[in-house]
Image (spheres, rainbow, N blue to C red):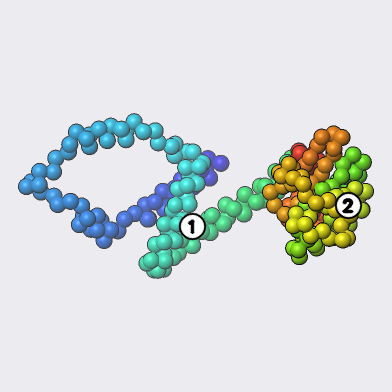
């Protein structure tokens, strides 16, 4: 490990030295400075001395700090790329490619150690509880869906649905069919509230809005609310168009106050 650190330090030192300013850059600095000479009386003022003292008091990050080292590596790589693009010589391009290759090798090594770590510490592997492989994923989603359905079935015994919509709106009319199918599948009673007084005949139990929307704080349409009058509970479930699966997840999240994973 010490040997590796020495090689890395030498490599970064070589990069810094190799990326130093050229004579033309030094000349530009000189001609951009204020005129020098005895007749301009360029003496250091107390203000400059104060600034120097302050800069000495400012704490500088340790050169061994990994964030500092990584920052310097990124800067060196970007500087080498910029130099290669602006001055595309074989020397400049090869210097950039060598640095880039070093970064790629480090990333590859990190990936391999990541895999090794998960093998030695399986409790850190998110994929065990959240599989991504196709067949395992299907089984995982089926279990999650079953959990949601059980909760929603319990809610249907004590809660009903308020569906706020606009009868003249095409999106609202299509979503109404989804909400009706969802309510029927899970055993919810449902009340439709046409906000534009154009009740859809296929929506059950239409009621003209008499400040229900204002009382519940409906802020967009269409909207689905979960309501339990006896328990004095009102929960917004979804705004806008959703599929039945999305409604199931949205209701699960609302009922659990987003404390359980509903995705």
> Which residue in the protein does label 1 denote?
99
Where does the image place residue 120, in percent across and percent down from the top left?
74, 41
Vertical side of 92 occupied by 250: above or below? above
* In front of the other: 133 or 152: 152
**Which quarter of the figure is the N terminus placed in?**
top right
* In front of the other: 89 or 170: 170
Quarter assignment of residue 168 = bottom right
On screen, residue 179 versus residue 79, left or right, reads right
In the image, which disc is placed on residue 205?
A: 2
- Cα separation, mark 2 vs mark 1, equals 70 Å
Where does the image place residue 38, in percent across and percent down from the top left?
8, 46
On screen, residue 103 versus residue 128, left or right, reads left
* In front of the other: 118 or 258: 258
Vertical side of 143 occupied by 86: above or below? below
In the image, which disc is placed on residue 209?
A: none
On screen, residue 160 versus residue 220, left or right, reads right
Where does the image place residue 41, in percent across and percent down from the top left?
10, 43
């Amino acid at each position: 490990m010490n040997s590796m650190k020495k090689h890395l330090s030498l490599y970064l030192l070589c990069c810094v030295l190799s990326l130093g300013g050229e004579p033309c850059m030094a000349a530009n600095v000189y001609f951009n400075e204020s005129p020098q000479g005895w007749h301009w009386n360029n003496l250091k003022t107390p203000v400059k001395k104060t600034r120097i003292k302050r800069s000495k008091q400012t704490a500088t990050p340790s050169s061994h700090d990994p964030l500092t080292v990584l920052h310097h590596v990124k800067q060196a790589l970007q500087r080498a790329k910029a130099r290669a693009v602006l001055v595309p010589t074989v020397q400049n391009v090869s210097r950039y490619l060598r640095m880039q290759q070093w970064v790629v090798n480090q990333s590859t090594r990190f990936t391999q150690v990541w895999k090794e770590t998960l093998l030695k510490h399986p409790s850190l592997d998110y994929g065990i509880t959240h599989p991504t492989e196709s067949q395992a994923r299907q089984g995982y989603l089926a279990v999650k869906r079953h959990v949601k359905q059980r909760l929603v079935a319990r809610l249907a015994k004590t809660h009903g649905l308020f569906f706020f919509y606009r009868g003249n709106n095409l999106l609202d009319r299509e979503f109404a069919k989804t909400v009706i199918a969802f309510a029927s599948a899970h055993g919810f009673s449902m009340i439709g509230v046409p906000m534009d007084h154009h009740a859809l005949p296929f929506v059950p139990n239409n009621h003209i809005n008499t400040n229900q929307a204002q009382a519940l704080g409906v802020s967009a349409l269409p909207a689905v609310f979960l309501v339990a009058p006896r328990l004095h509970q009102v929960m917004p479930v979804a705004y806008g168009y959703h599929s039945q699966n999305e409604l199931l997840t949205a209701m699960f999240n609302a009922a659990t106050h987003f404390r359980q994973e509903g995705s």
